[in-house]
Structure formats: C-alpha cells, structure tokens
Image (spheres, rainbow, N blue to C red):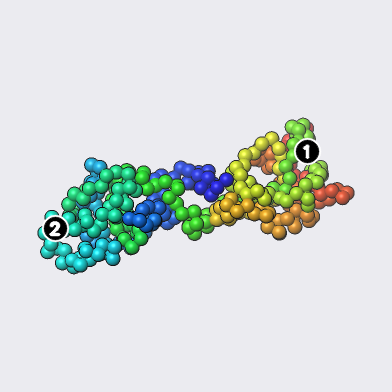
Amino acid sequence: MKSLEILSALPKWAHAGHGQIVDSPAFSMPCRLGEETVHLRTGAVESADTLDLSILFGDELHALKLARSPRFAELGKIWDARADVPEPILLALVERDCGPFFQLLENAVRRQLKVAALSPSSGGAEPGPVMSFQVADISFSLTCSAAVSNAFGSLRHLDLAHPSLRAETLAAEVEYAAFMLSATDLAAMSAGDALLLPEIGTVPPRLVADGRFVLDANGVAPFAEDERCRVVSADPRSITLGELFDAAEDAPSSAVGEADYSKACGHLQQLRLVHNGATVASGRLDRLGDQPAFIVETTNHPTT
C-alpha cells in the first residue's frame, strides 16, 4: 500500500467532507503560477490592507481580497493611492498584473474566472465562509462555496508529510503467530491448555494497526480477519500515521522493534488468542519442553 491508500482507508479521512479537508492544516494543493509549481495552503494571516474584488467563477459571484505582494509589481506602484485611480483603469491594471494568479485560481476551481468589479470590504452576500490562503508570496482570502470546496477538497491535496497528519495515532497489536484451530478445539479450550508456537523466535512478529493494516518486512498491506486464530501481545500498543507512511514507502527490515522481538523469544509475556476479531482466550508465553507455547489462563469460550 502507498501512503495515500492508507489515508483513504481510514474512516476519519475516507468520510471527510471537502470543507474539512480544505480546513486541515495539512491542506497543500499543487498549482501552476506562471511557470512555477507552487502549493496553495490555508491559514495565511489576513491582511488589514487588501484590494477587494468581486469575481465570478462561471456565474457564481465570490469575494476575493488580495494582500499587497511583490508579485504584483505594477499594482505595488500605485497601491497606496489606488483609491484615487479610476475604477476602469484600476481594473485593467489588476487584470494585467494578476493574470497568472487569476489563471491559477481558474485552473484550481475548474471554472472560468472573470473579474466583475471592485468590491468594498463590506460587500454583499457571500457564497460560503471566507477562508485565507497563501500561494507562493501571495496572500488572499476567498469565499468558499460548495463548488470551490469540492474542487479544492480532495485527499490527494493533503501533505502527507505534515506533522498534523503524521502525529495521528492508531491502536496496534503485535502478532506473533497465526494458525487454524477447529471449532471443536476452540470450544473445548480451558485454563491450563497449551498451544505450541514454533513460529516464535524464528519468524519475526508482525504489527496489525487499527485492524486494517498489517506491517511486516514487505511494508504495509491491507488486513482482514480470517478463520485463523492469532496470538497477539496483550500489552496496548499504538503507531503513528507517520510511522505507517514510512513503512509503506520504505519497507522496514522488521515490522516491530527489537524489544518486541526480544519479548517473542522470552517467557511469561501476557498474550491474547484472537479469533474473528474477538479475544477467545488470555494467557502467557512459556515453554513446553523446548517449544514456545501459549498457556491458556482464562477463556471467553464456553467449555463443553
């Protein structure tokens, strides 16, 4: 799996609305500004001194507020005196100086952009909330209608290296062995029973994250419970999305740390036996002769 596939498999993000994605600190939409590749991001500090415009995306009216930028060199020359410039002349200057920026917005929203008029900051009804953006050295705010949010709000526009994403945690468990047990054997299991685990100490353990992903030496793959019983550590464990992304993009030599592997070779570690996602027995890791074994201490299955 790739990092974006992992993110798309998590309910929090799979079901995220477009507005939620745009509002995320990790939002970073790649765009073209003239010949440059730039990234459109949210959270810019809104300037108190802006050039306020009414623009159309198709036939939808929006308010756009532009902060002063060295990118707009000609506008910069008359910025402080722009109130004295006749509106047709100022609009013509805006169209010429801001052309690449307007083209960026038009491409991003996927609707034709037209500058309608100069607009006072207290202008009329706005189609949606106002959001502040930064792209290269341009700061601006824009009303975000459903059309804008839908165009911007794709999971592929999230920066998967952003700390706010990488720090998210998922519950995880270390899996030491997996094998088939008949329904009769499961039902008959009771305290004191021993299950031999020849894998322990010879096969590196795997990590199962969020019940959705399995990490091993090959990287990250989708996980789903099957009919096998799984022996997992009883100790609570978590993994960050950043660690999961790293394992997906660069397969680790071991899915779990050395401490986990040492536990797998040791004695008296508390374990759980899981079947179809439910814990059916709890116990400890011990030895039976020269073989590692799961010693059942309690069972959640009725004995017959």
Residue found farthest to the front: 35
Q: Which amino acid does label 2 sit on?
A: Ile
Q: Is residue 195 above or below residue 261?
A: above
- Graded by Cα atoms within 10 Å as few (under 14), some (14 to 19) or many (20 or more), the crowding at tag 1 reads many
Q: Quadrant of residue 222?
A: top right
Q: Is residue 153 above or below residue 69?
A: above
Percent x, y for residue 224?
62, 39
> What label does residue 89 carry, if any?
2
Secondary structure under tag 2 reads helix
Percent x, y for residue 217?
67, 50
Percent x, y for residue 101?
29, 55
The reply to whether residue 122 is visible in this rendering is no
Closest to the observer, 36 or 253: 36
Please give the name of the residue rendered at 80% of the width and 46% of the height, measured from the top-left corner: 198
- State which tag comes first along the sequence, 2 or 1: 2
- Graded by Cα atoms within 10 Å as few (under 14), some (14 to 19) or many (20 or more), the crowding at tag 2 reads few
Closest to the observer, 231 or 189: 231
> What label does residue 189 carry, if any?
1
Secondary structure under tag 1 reads loop
In-image side of 46 versus 84 (left or right): right
Please give the name of the residue rendered at 22% of the width and 64% of the height, measured from the top-left corner: 74
